[in-house]
Image (cartoon, rainbow, N blue to C red):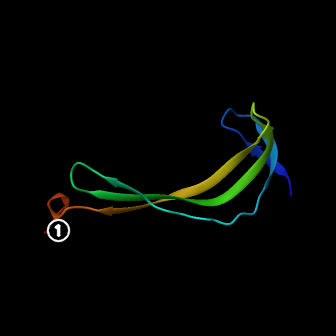
Amino acid sequence: MKREYPLPNGQKVSGEEVEFEAEKENFNVYILHDGTTLKVKHVVAQIIRLDAYGPDGNPMYMVNGGMVISADVPDQLKKRNP
């Protein structure tokens, strides 16, 4: 079912939600110079194919989701509770 979606420039464009399956959802792992290891993953909740097209002719997509972050922090950086 098509509906209107707002673009960052304030315009509205019609589009419709597209069903999907995640093929892979790996974490990106970052080693910080303070010894912390951060694991970051973007988890997609919704994909909308817009009735708008890029210069190459491909349809534009809007992706809604969130970040999952896990931190392994060295003991010396942790706050001690009294």
Horizontal and vertical percent for residue 10? 70, 34
Q: In this rendering, would 33 be left or right of 24?
A: left
Q: Residue furthest right?
A: 1
Horizontal and vertical percent for residue 7? 70, 39
12 and 75: which is toward the camera:
75
| Residue under the image location 23 percent in, 48 percent down | 33
Residue occupied by mark 1: 81
| Residue under the image location 75 percent in, 46 percent down | 5
Q: Is residue 71 above or below residue 10?
A: below
Q: Quadrant of the N terminus?
A: bottom right
Picture quarter containing residue 73? bottom left
Picture quarter containing residue 56? top right
Q: Is residue 19 above or below residue 12?
A: below
| Residue under the image location 63 percent in, 54 percent down | 64
Horizontal and vertical percent for residue 41? 48, 59
34 and 6: which is toward the camera:
34
| Residue under the image location 70 percent in, 55 percent down | 47
What element does badge 1 sit on?
A: loop
Q: Residue furthest bottom?
A: 82
Q: In this rendering, would 78 be left or right of 58?
A: left
Q: Name the amino acid, label 1.
A: Asn
Q: In this rendering, would 8 be left or right of 70?
A: right
At label 1, counting other C-alpha atoms closer than 10 Å, the crowd grade (few under 14, some 14-19, many 20 or more) is few
Q: Quadrant of the C terminus?
A: bottom left
Horizontal and vertical percent for residue 44? 60, 59
